[in-house]
Amino acid sequence: MTLQTELAQTDVVLRLVGESGEGTVSLGDLAVKMFVMMGLDIYTFQTFPAEIKGGTVMYQIRARSGVPLSHGDAADVLIALNDEGFDLFGEGLREDGILLYDSDVFTPTPCPGRTDYGLPISALARIQKEAVRHEVTPEQLKRLPAPKNMVGLGALLRLVNAPLQPAEQYIRDLFGRKGEAIVQMNICALHTGADRVAEQIGSKRTPRLFPVPRTEPIITINGNQMLAMGAIAAGMRFYAGYPITPASEIMEFLAKELPRFGGNLIQAEDEMAAIGMCLGASYAGVKSMTASAGPGISLMVEQINLAGQAEIPLVVADIQRGGASTGMPTKTSQGDLNLALYGVHNESPRIVLAAASVEDCFWTTLEAFNLAEAYQCPVLLLSDQALATRKCTLPPPDLSQVKVVNRLTPTPEERAAGYKRYADTPTGISPMSVPGMEKGVYVSTGIEHDEEGNPGYTPELASKMKAKRFRKLETLRRERAHEFVRLWGDTGDLDVGIIAFGSTEGVIREATDRARAEGYKVGHLHLRMLNPLPVESVQEFAARCRQILVPELNFTGQLAGWLRVNTDIRFHPFHKDEGIPFLPNEIYRQITMLAGQ
Amino acid sequence: MATAPIQLTPKDYKSDLKPIWCAGCGDFGVLSALYKALSICNYDPEQTAIVSGIGCSSRLPGFVTTYGFHGVHGRALPIATGLKSSRPELNVVVVGGDGDGYSIGAGHFPHCARRNPDITYLIMNNNTYGLTKGQVSPTSMIPLASNDPKIDPKRWKTTPYGMTEDSLNPLAQAIAWDVSFVARAFSYKPNQLTDLLVQALQHKGFALLDVFSPCPTFNSDQTEDYYKEHVFDVPEDHDPTDRVKAFALSLCMDGYPIGVLYKHENKPSLLDEQAWLRQRFTQEPSAALEALFHTFD
């Protein structure tokens, strides 16, 4: 086997499980850092309990040379720090997989095919701490945690045949200022973990992760962070929000970063205040956003409608989570599509976008702001828990490609000639003044109004003004909706075509590629804009497909319903809502099954 | 505060739109005092925004020549806070009724007090829901003299057997929350109302002016005459910076004090904090964005 083919095969899925709050996530983060330092690309999936302490957290890392499109199917290696985690997530390990468990905590029943390595991680970590007892001050000793993570990391790296040098370097950087004793304790812990596993491995085979030279700059970032970055790039200078899982990270990130850009952030008393503040800011001419999850978006619905009726640009990000009501706050779902599309009393125009990948969180958020400004209406931006917490390696976005759109404002001449805020125009878009503009005075209002903004409810006015507002969406559908679809896979006639939206893009691409490698003709249309639906793109695509699959992560098939409302295409819905993302194999099986029909 | 380049008169603030209020509505007096107060402060109408919620009194922004925002029920304070935070140089006034401010929007009140933005909140308190035609409101109350069992207080449309809930004391509440300016006026004492409104507008921070603005159509208890009988001026020797005394005055059981009850001068404001943060951290945006991406290397 040449080095080249071995490199191509570098693709390992690691799954870490343990009690929440006990360092499982930090161990996962450490492993991610090491893999990135080795030049590999990563893709993670995290699923948490809703509790702060206790409950089981699962952190899956796929590392490979070449960009991973999903978190992978079965894990090659499972690292179980407690028995509950093993019971809950052990099934995700492939039959011939490797299990590393903390033998201080539990001993799993052996299973034919599986290779088990027990390591007394806690005990080994305590020994390392004991060894430096006399080299640190009593104060330091009291606060010094036993280096469980480093024992675990050493073992993990050894299991995938990864070098320890990057970890050593990282330890030096991290603990250098705490003194050489602490650096050595951690390095010893790292080696102990690696050595103790190596003794057990002997000559058995384990997966291999080779370092890859990296030439281009790379960042490791998750969906929430990319979304926040997209908002900043778009010129958002006001954010208000209320804490909610899994959207809070956006507010926390922006609280720190927005002042650098001259922006303001307010943690509101509730979601109604949050969106109200954003409307006030946008009315004042400052681009604004709020982000929440389903329960919070529900509380915002009335004012999303106000933004539609009063024609105020606004971006509302919904980081979807599992279940109805409190549901499953830390799990993923695509269950808010209907809320985004239909969450309104009566009718008012809105745009609905969905980010397709971590990288796309940046670009779709940028587009969300540009569309909100261009069409003066609310833009609902869908992400979800899996995408929000998914860490990926990717090149930093090319900022020279960032095009920022600002709302149309009336010229001084237009204002002097008798300004009409809600002028009925061929596109439906009317110039919007902002407070402070000379002769631009108007009342922004949710009450039905005439072109000047004065209240009025005659039948003629009601129909004229509603048509004016909805004309904006028609303009958008006609002029730009087709730009918001992405086509993957085969061109020409297809055995199976897939239509999907949001965070499932990568996993569908991976499944599509797998099926295509076996000779199936498969294509994939991914929707980044749901409203207005790019109907022509959908119909053109559908015309090429013998069978169409519509996979989505909700119970009732919300995209399927929306396609039925807007098109006459026939398709096979595939929907489930279990709180976890699709696996490539699930989609692949659907493709091959349909191809055979 | 953004003033006009030339001295404006009350008429300059009057729009072409005619108020939709019933004849004899207390809100006319408030509107007229507002025109006067805006002219005394000489606010530039193009640099001023009046934000409201929903209700009879919330239609007010349309009757003024300033910028306006007529939003949804109960959310005027958050909308005004976002507006003021984004454009601190603008004059921001919030208007609305007791239902809007003390019921559906009540949750925003203490938090606006905590933030203390430079916003004036003018509440036209008619002790009922007027626009929805006479339901009980949080400030609906049993008349002061009605301890006499022979007097049968008004039965609201939603309390046909008599009120089942206690009424709310907005002034005591505002003082408890440390709203930095708390005053009450009466729409049939127009000069005093104008004067209090000017003080509220000129106060740096969040100012509440609760105005008794009787509803002649649905409230037969708290009428013009009723208030004329029961309001009294805040005693001249009252020290509004004494929070405990202000609180005591707001709890007065045998009449309604009119005037400035409480003042917390120089209370820190969210706007000042935000200005400080911006001044401390603002960088050139494109370089800052690039640098921010590098933190994910």
Image (spheres, rainbow, N blue to C red):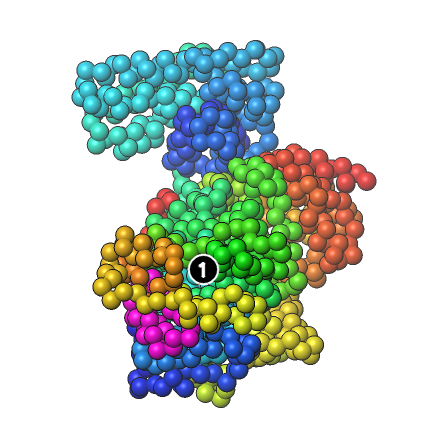
Does the rendering let one see residue A64? no
Label 1 element class = helix
Q: Amino acid at mark 1?
A: Leu
**Is A484 a magenta residue?**
no
Q: Residues within 10 Å of mark 1 (few under 14, many from 20)?
A: some
B56 or A434: nearer the eye? B56
Q: Chain of mark 1?
A: B
**In the image, A28: left or right of A572?**
left
Q: Is residue A246 above or below residue A197?
A: below
Does the rendering let one see residue A86? yes
> Measured from the top left, where is residue A294 in percent x and y?
56, 47
> Measured from the top left, where is residue A141 in percent x and y?
23, 21
Q: What are the residue bounds of the magenta stretch?
A: B182-206
Instruction: Name the residue located 37 percent from the left edge and 80 percent from the top edge.
Output: B36
Q: Is residue B200 above or below residue A324?
A: below
For label 1, the residue is B144
Q: Is residue A153 above or below residue A497?
A: above
Instruction: Name the residue located 68 percent from the left edge and 43 percent from the top edge.
Output: A551
Q: Is residue A103 above or below residue A308?
A: above
A68 or B199: nearer the eye? B199
Residue A35 sits in quarter: top left
Instruction: Name the residue located 42 percent from the left edge and 49 percent from the top edge.
Output: A251
A231 or B166: nearer the eye? B166
Image quarter hosting the C terminus of chain A = top right
> Measured from the top left, where is residue A230 in percent x and y?
45, 55
> Measured from the top left, where is residue A500 in percent x and y?
65, 48
Instruction: Name the residue located 59 percent from the left edge and 60 percent from the top edge.
Output: B156
